[in-house]
Amino acid sequence: MSGDKHSGRQTLYICIAIVIAIFLAVVFPAFSMNFHLGGEVFLNLLKMMVVPLVMSSVMCGILGMGDVRKLGKPGFYTIVYYFCTTVLAVVVGLVVVNVIQPGVGTVSDEAIAELKGDDAATGERIYGYLAAQIDVPKEKVADFFGSPENVEPTIGMIVENLVTSLFTDNLFTAASETNLLPLIVFSIIFAGMLTTLGENVDTLKTGIEQINHALMAFVMLLMKVAPFGIFCLVTARFGQAQAEGKLGDVFEQTGWYMMTVLSGLGIHALVTLPVIFWFFTRKNPYQFLWQMSRAVLTAFSTASSSATLPVTMECAEKEGGVSERSTNFVLPLGATINMDGTALYEAAAAIFIAQVVGMDMSLVQQLTIALTATLAAVGAAGIPEAGLVTMLIVLNAVGLPVEYVALILSVDWLLDRFRTAVNTFGDACGAAIIDTNFETVPVGGNSAGAKPDAVAR
């Protein structure tokens, strides 16, 4: 009970920190930008934990099953769940944008005329914008995503990229770039192999479990300074936007678009996911949302579901009541492939741009957007605003001019925080659902707090 009170107080502190941060950014933008160092330190501490925590937690999740063959059903249904919720998010986005029609009569002819240009120049502009946001050279962004003028719109290319991204020729390179998919694949295969080697590797298994336990203890220690770190992150970012005059432009030029995307994200987070959560767990989804609030607020502050992963795992296990094994396996996978908010945003943005240019989208074209947005969102990198790059693929798939992405650049940094929060809550819901519907007892019998040794439903 004391733990619940402590987490409740910390959630309140984080909420207060965000409110004060936004107030300071609006009133004293120049002063607020001085907090960027504290925000960067906190964000780097979170990112520092991601790779070792993902690898150790996934391995612990596999080792906890005892027999690697038990991975089949939970693993399959985890992927199915994440794919289905992403599709539902895209559908919500398409419905909302078609109902509100934010691109009809909201953008002036002068603004549209200024946007016309060649696609390669637009790609370069987006890469330059991303480089500035994540503080890396533009050449490194281009190396990661590929040359902007060579972005092909084919579905086959997207699928091929997804398959090849599962594997790497150098684990250390993948770790240095926080490329989690190949690390997860390696961890699953390596831990699965350990389950077949018997007592010969008991020391190694124990070492992996102890490393994972120590890393989670470090995360809990880090959360003690989370309110201050989040305050610095939000103050510096919003202060920079206010100093550059972006906050006023955001609401003046793209207010209807913002309202559309936020409405779609709200429906998905507060209606779609809670209904699915209640159907499979028969638990109160809004109580679970409160239990995950620290992770959701951290996701909003960092704009990165990967960086938020350590906090998501700590909240799901300690406050949400999700078993350690489900947390260890499902959440790292979700932070990598579950991008509900990003998919919804890309679908809504594509239709918004079509409305701006006066293009009537047929049902087939909208279905193409839905499929492309789903696949492109899965392939989005775990860095802030990477969805802008995959947006180029979505627009190309239906023949929309990619230069109109410039319409949403001024607002993307803010919407990115909301969609990341939705992604994180979707990850947590997936972990709870898989945990409820599949056996979660460690081999060797019941442990404290474990569920009965049975497969639910």
Image (cartoon, rainbow, N blue to C red):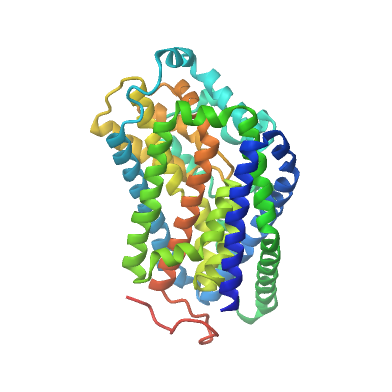
Residue 212's quadrant in the figure?
bottom right
Please provide percent x and percent y for residue 308: 59, 54
Question: 292 above or below 283?
Answer: above
Q: Which quadrant would residue 401 be assigned to in this image? A: top left
Picture layout, residue 355 above or below residue 374: above
> Does the image show residue 177?
no
Give the residue at x 69% y 74%: 210
Q: Which residue is located at x 70 percent, y 59 percent?
A: 225
Q: Quadrant of the C terminus?
A: bottom left
x and y percentages locating residue 455 in the rendered image: 38, 78
Along the viewing direction, whichever of 271 and 148 lies nearer the viewer = 271
* Viewer-nearest residue: 179 or 283: 283
Residue 327 in sight in this render: yes
User: Residue 38 at what x, y percent from top left?
Assistant: 74, 48
x 49%, y 43%: residue? 379
Q: Quadrant of residue 384?
A: top right
- In the rendered structure, the answer to whether residue 347 lies left or right of residue 303 reads left
Q: Nearer the viewer, residue 404 or 190?
A: 404
> Furthest residue to the left?
363
> Which quadrant is home to the N terminus?
bottom right
| Residue 156, percent from left and from top | 40, 36
The single residue placed furthest to the bottom in the displayed view is: 445
Figure label count: 0
Q: Nearer the viewer, residue 116 or 290?
A: 290
The residue lying at 60 percent from left, 29 percent from top is 129
